[in-house]
Image (tube, grey):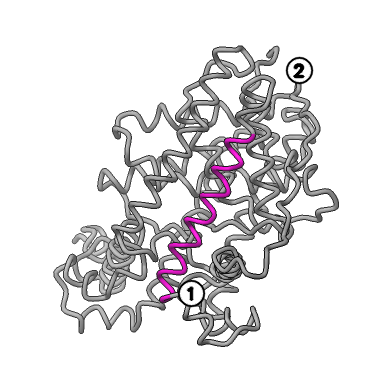
Amino acid sequence: MAKISDTGLAGSNSPFNRSAQHDAKRTAILSQAARLFNSKGSRATTLQDISATLGLTKTSLYYYVKTKEELIYQCYLATLEHHLAGMDEIEARFPAPLDRARAFFLQQFETWLAARQNRGPHFAAPLEIASLPGPQRREVEARYISMFRRLRGYLRDAIATGSVRQCETTSATRAIIGSLDWIFSWLHSHPQDQVDHIALQAWDIVEYGFYNGSGEYVPAPMRPDPPQAGYIHGFDREAQKRLKQQAFYKAGTWFFNKQGFNGTSLDEIAEHLNVSKGAFYYHIKNKEDLLFNCYVYSLDITEGIYRQAAALEGSALHKLDQICRRIFFAQNSDQGPLIRYNTITALPLPRRKQILERTEEFNRSFGDVVRAGIADSSIRKIEPFIAQHLIAGAVNAAMDIKLWRRVDDLDATAVDYFDVFFNGLRPRPHQ
């Protein structure tokens, strides 16, 4: 007589297995929440939105999650657990460290594509880790750091075996992960049947940047433009107003970058600036308006840097180098900080589109420089739009580098950070 177990009805696929059903429903909830968080933003997404798209009542949803904040936390954990589980599989399959780095890199594109093609769940981009409550934030950060260290370990092992040239691995790892975190913002604009090709071409730039051979890129010295004089005539009210607004935008940017949109308080910013709430609210309407203007202010700075660097003499690769390093300097010096795009989904859709359209226009400028470099032979023949998005993602993640490594010389750190891209673009003799 056949056993129940032989029929498959007692296994994890059984319709009577309550634990499996619960896990499947929880996965569906996290996937749908992640899809909405990535597209609409966590601030604009409600639990009712999530339950409605799943055909659930709010009561049914509350059985799995009590608050939106808890759901965000669970989504971020699911994302990082997916990455770490993927690394477990990669390490079991690939003994060579550079092959492991390659597999991890390509896996991020495949995960995105699988969700788009309904072959796998959606995973939330962990944009607002800073706004999570303390214990939850520390747990998510611990998993993020674990992922970071494992990828950095692949690079260090590859250097030890001679398959990768000497480089500053903490900076390189940060730049690569920053590029990968950015794919959710641009990959959707390309046909799905091109994603595999795009992923391979993106990895080609990174792998080429690690090539352990002759012809490494040697950056020229960079001297930041001197800051503008701070003297303002005492009766120039418009200039005084402008300086105060800039102080608000700089302080707001710092708090949004550190604490996320939900974790930032306007009263806290006013106290930080040592101004009365009345004076603060005279210039700032509300938190959303401050965030929007922080993006505008940062874009004004980056576009000014681009215009100055683009006017320099030299090859296109030299100009690209100067643009990246000057933005890095602005992000991590007293000139900044510049806004991180981790808070972009906190803006309402019309304002978000306005910022993203201007951002994309600026990112295309990177592509224009790459095309010019291909024309003047300072950059090898690659697909410019892929290079521009990799660099844009790395630029966004370049803030707070001091949290990841010791910084004695800010520009030398910038060179370390963008090194893999400069060398990935430069024509070099190869094996």
Q: Is residue 155 left or right of residue 287?
A: right
Amino acid found under the numbered disc labelled 1: His
Provide residue 309's location: percent of width, then percent of height: 64, 33
Residue at (45, 29) in percent of width and height:
385
Circle 1 crowding by C-alpha within 10 Å: few under 14, some 14–19, many from 20:
few
Residue 9 lies, with reference to residue 268, above or below; the image says above
Toward which corner of the image does residue 99 lie, by quadrant? Answer: top right
Is residue 254 something that shows in the picture? no
Provide residue 172's location: percent of width, then percent of height: 68, 42
Residue at (66, 19) in percent of width and height:
315
Front residue of 370 and 80: 370
Provide residue 346's location: percent of width, then percent of height: 39, 66
Element assignment for label 1: helix
Residue tagged 1: 283
Residue at (72, 61) in percent of width and height:
231
Toward which corner of the image does residue 122 lie, by quadrant? Answer: bottom left
Q: Which circle, 1 or 2, is nearer the viewer?
A: 1
Amino acid found under the numbered disc labelled 2: Gly
Residue 279 lies, with reference to residue 365, above or below; the image says below
Q: Mark 1 or 2 closer to N-term?
A: 2
Toward which corner of the image does residue 344 lie, by quadrant? Answer: bottom left
Extent of the magenta region: 285-308
Residue tagged 2: 215
